Amino acid sequence: MPLFLVRNDITKMECDAIVNAANSSLLGGGGVDGAIHKAAGPELLEKTKTLGGCEPGKAKLTKGYKLPASYIIHTAGPKWHGGNEGEADILKSCYVSCLEIAKKNKFKTVAFPLISTGIYGYPKDEAMRIACDTIEEFLISGPDMMVYLVFFDTGSYCIGKELYKEIACFIDDNYYEAYREPGHDRDARLQNSASITGNMFPSEVGRSFTEDDITECQYSIESMVRHMDESFTDYLLKKIDEKGITDTECYKRANVDRRLFSKIRSNRLYHPKKYTAIAFADALRLNLAETNELLMKAGYILTHSSKADTIIEYCINNNIYDIYKINETLFSFDQPLLG
């Protein structure tokens, strides 16, 4: 199952369990910890008093009490001391410990905050990389679980500052300012359709069509359908074979649910959403030309009238195919995510 980045208040997440970035006492504190204790009610504090605290990197389970989530997984993250005191190993252990508890209890949906990035001072970009890598590694092993990384806002972006600056410059150089006006940032399919219909019959404008014209048109449509190019599904499955990867590798790299992939595989005329199609292009490590060819099978193209498309083009040109890193970048610029 996939990993999603979402902007929300974690205390309002309706899922099997949310993760509390707690202190070692488990008795409440500031930030996410304090917000969860406040929302869950006094019963949570009474329960955590009986747990004997929690070692950094470990996790413990309680009920959710007044929260929409059924359970809370409490974990104590590391304090940042410059990165030379095993902070990365402890932080990774936090995620693993929480995920193991979720797996043991057969939770289907779990929501994490970005652990240790508040008053504990862990750099956000490094903490984000550990979170995504650890969760991805865990999900690839097979648990049927949906995991959310929850951010209260995108004010403090999580990707590295240098990468952010490079992409911002690329957007400035390539993203068409004219398309920022309302009505111009349209789906590429509509742009393509407009250009096609605008050039097909320029001499026919205003002319009445006869019965012979209609018959000829019907014949042309039937001929086109009979000779229709390969579909998105056809092209996708061909590329999976060419790249020598399994279906499972493909849909997990694309951050796509297995059930959705099954629908695509079983229906050669399946029509995906644009950013699902791009996710598959990323999973297959396609270059820019191949990506646009795959997208065209579904009726789309990458366009500089879309900021998200411009960011994706940057990632392809710079061989950035880690979908979680791409999604972190899109999230930082407040754009739709892949998968």
Image (spheres, rainbow, N blue to C red):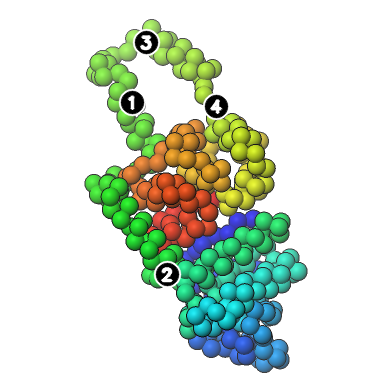
Q: Residue at x 62, y 88 (%)?
A: 24
- 256 with respect to 278 (left or right): right
The first of marks 4 and 3 along the sequence is: 3
- 332 with respect to 10 (left or right): left
Q: Which residue is mark 3?
A: 213
Percent from the top left, x then y, of residue 298? 49, 35
The amino acid type, in three-letter code, at marker 1 is Thr
Q: Is residue 335 above or below residue 232?
A: below
Q: Is residue 46 above or below residue 169?
A: below
Estimate the spatial distance between the alpha carbons at disc 1 and disc 2, rounded to whole Å: 42 Å
Percent from the top left, x then y, of residue 323? 52, 53
Badge 1 density bin: few <14, some 14–19, many ≥20, Cα 10 Å: few
The amino acid type, in three-letter code, at marker 2 is Asp
The amino acid type, in three-letter code, at marker 3 is Asp
Percent from the top left, x then y, of residue 276? 52, 46
The first of marks 1 and 4 along the sequence is: 1
The amino acid type, in three-letter code, at marker 4 is Glu
Badge 3 density bin: few <14, some 14–19, many ≥20, Cα 10 Å: few
Asked if marks 1 and 4 touch (Cβ < 8 Å), the reply is no
Estimate the spatial distance between the alpha carbons at disc 1 and disc 4, rounded to whole Å: 22 Å
In this view of the protein, can residue 228 be seen by the observer?
Answer: yes
State which mark lies toward you, 3 or 2. Answer: 2
In this view of the protein, can residue 21 be seen by the observer?
Answer: no
Residue 153 badge: 2
Percent from the top left, x then y, of residue 64? 64, 78
Residue 197 badge: 1
Q: Residue at x 59, y 50 (%)?
A: 253
Q: Residue at x 67, y 56 (%)?
A: 140
Estimate the spatial distance between the alpha carbons at disc 1 and disc 3, rounded to whole Å: 17 Å
The first of marks 1 and 3 along the sequence is: 1
The first of marks 1 and 2 along the sequence is: 2
Q: Which residue is mark 4?
A: 230
